[in-house]
Image (cartoon, rainbow, N blue to C red):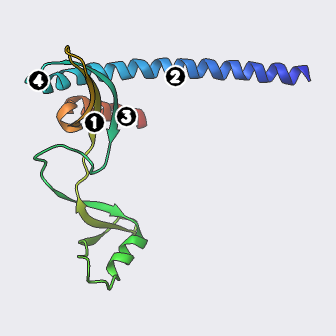
Amino acid sequence: MSKITKKLFDDYKATKKVVKTAKFAHSLNTNKIIEIINPYVDEEYKKHPCHHRITSFNFCYDNDYKIENLPVEQEWIEISKKEYYNIYHNKDTFFKKPEIKTEDTADYDEIYYKKDKKRYNYLRVYVHESWAYGGNDDVSFDFLLTNIMDNNYLRKEKLKKLNEIS
């Protein structure tokens, strides 16, 4: 019984150590991201100066962004065979059917696509504001990742991954 208990405690301590190092690495990466975002958030406060601090951020991939003047673009999105046939054989004329297409691959399979609104990757940053005369507020700002990230950096990371695979 004592060998099992000792083994359980050793495993628990090892797991606790791994979790602690992972949390530390995560906090370092979070701090790096906040350093990159800070100038973009500071740009928002040039007209209305107040004390502000980034509390958290979230990477989003949906159409719930608040970015103004964003063009509505269409793109081809890959869908399943079942969804393709549901759209193709849909008799309901109440809703407009999305455009669909198929593409043949080299191994005689088909890939199915539908045309839909382009989805953007963006970063939602939560900021806490406070003023000298009292009062505070929590606001959020949305930034498109394509505007924030350096494309050369992204290409470099992709090349590293390709080199690791080959």
Q: Which mark is residue 90?
A: none
Image coordinates of residue 124 in percent, x first then y, are: 28, 36
Report how far apart the C-alphas of labels 1 and 3 lie in the structure. Answer: 23 Å
Three-letter amino acid code of the residue under disc 3 = Lys
In the depicted structure, whether residue 155 falls above or below residue 7: below
Mark sitting earlier along the chain (3/2) = 2
Image coordinates of residue 6 in percent, x first then y, are: 82, 18
**Secondary structure of residue under mark 3:** helix
Asked if marks 2 and 1 touch (Cβ < 8 Å), the reply is: no
Mark sitting earlier along the chain (2/4) = 2
Q: Which mark is residue 48?
A: 4
Q: Which mark is residue 22?
A: 2
**Residue at which label 1 appears:** 123
Are there few (<14), some (14-19), or many (20+) residues within 10 Å of tag 4? few
**Secondary structure of residue under mark 2:** helix
Instruction: Return the residue nearer the eye: 47 or 162.
Output: 47
Looking at the rendering, in which quadrant would you find the C terminus? top left
Asked if marks 3 and 4 touch (Cβ < 8 Å), the reply is: no
Report how far apart the C-alphas of labels 4 and 1 lie in the structure. Answer: 22 Å
Image coordinates of residue 160 in percent, x first then y, are: 34, 30
Q: Residue at x 88, y 21 (%)?
A: 3
**Residue at which label 3 appears:** 161
Please indicate whether residue 2 sits to the left or right of residue 114 in the image. right
Are there few (<14), some (14-19), or many (20+) residues within 10 Å of tag 2? few
In the depicted structure, whether residue 144 falls above or below residue 30: below
